Amino acid sequence: MKILSVVGARPQFIKAAMLSKAWAEKDNCEEVLVHTGQHYDSAMSDVFFAEMDIPEPKYHLGVGSGLHGAQTGKMLEEIEKVLLEEKPDWVVIYGDTNSTLSAALAASKLHIPLAHVEAGLRSFNRNMPEEINRLVADQLSAIRFTPTQEATNHLIQEGFDKDSIHQVGDVMYDAVLHFGGGEPKDSILDQIGIDGPFVLATIHRAENTDCASRLRAIITGLQEVHQDVPVVWPIHPRTRKALSEMNLDYQIHISNPVGYLEMLYLERRASLIVTDSGGVQKEAYFNKTPCVTARTETEWVELVEQGWNQLADPTDPGSIPKCVRGALSQDLPDYNTNLYGDGQSAKNMVDILINH
């Protein structure tokens, strides 16, 4: 049996790593890994493959960045060629990126069954390109792997066949259990000289980085937080470029992107995390670190309901400091170990694909 996994961005590398490990334990099973090159910077791509021992992609499409239509079109064309060459039994897609959308379209056009990992997530904000990608991917999939009860409920409410929905837990939880706990030899904390409390920041979403007023408000908020507790920000290349173009004056500890293992270490060490990343919201929870999300909505509503996450309006400079101070002044909420499954989601997905 052959599956073809399509990845292109950091969160997908993490999810695919766990599925690859589970798939490799099965007899007479082959995985073909396709890297679209959506994240092409070595600090955002190569380091993850090395650290997580992900098999070298058989196909590296090298598409790179670009406008949504151009990027998706290039990926669609190249993925179609790979599918015609490999003729897999299943195409597996992850999350909600343009790589996800392109692979879903290519597979459906060629009538190859599609399995969507992290199905059923909804922000209900169609201004987010990720929301459109999720909706299309779920529509085209034959198997929909959901991480939470909330995601399962969304699909049921939208009328999907219940037999196509499999609530397997969150594969990123698998990854944290497998890779977490280590300490890098040369952390950016050592380089900066921080051995006490700090706030970890990650901001990369286009709606925040491509809008000067929103990015300025976020920077202003983080700068205010930095006056109380140091802010450490491993910066995404897109965000660094936007900041450079804006020529803003700010005092925050900014570093180059870090690998997955160091990111887990920073998340575990931080007093609090400020992010606009869906994956980092969950990693914060897995590491029992409170989180403030610089968005007005989130797909991971259960984290807000549980008290581990707060939403901060990215257009209001005072919103992030207010949320951060509130979170740091409170005791940590109870930790629900069953919220995202039992850490066996990759194994569950592989078993379902083989037995389908």
Image (tube, grey):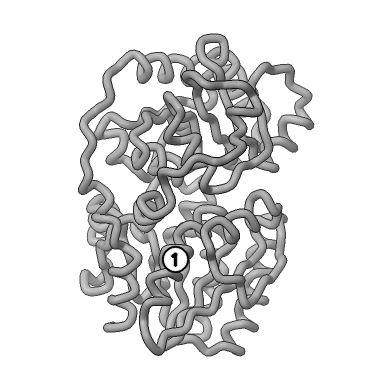
Q: Which amino acid does label 1 sit on?
A: Ala
Q: Exactly how many numbered labels are in the figure?
A: 1
- Direction from residue 272 to residue 128 in the image, left or right: right
Q: Is residue 308 above or below residue 142?
A: above
Residue beneath the point at 56% across and 15% down: 226
Q: In this view, does 326 lie above or below 71?
A: above
Circle 1 SS class: helix
Residue farthest along the top direction in this orientation: 227
Query: Which quadrant: the C terminus?
Result: bottom left
Residue 300 screen position, x and y as percent: 35, 43
Q: In this view, does 115 lie above or below 176?
A: below
Residue beneath the point at 61% across and 68% down: 35
Residue farthest along the front direction in this orientation: 185
Residue beneath the point at 47% across and 68% down: 93
Residue 1 screen position, x and y as percent: 41, 88
Q: How crowded is mark 1: few (under 14 residues within 10 Å), some or many (20 or more)?
A: many
Residue beneath the point at 64% across and 36% down: 235
Asked which quadrant contains residue 217, the reply is top right
Camera-nearest residue between 342 and 87? 342
Residue 4 screen position, x and y as percent: 50, 78
Residue 48 screen position, x and y as percent: 58, 55
Question: Disc 1 marks which residue?
Answer: 137
Camera-nearest residue between 350 and 206? 350
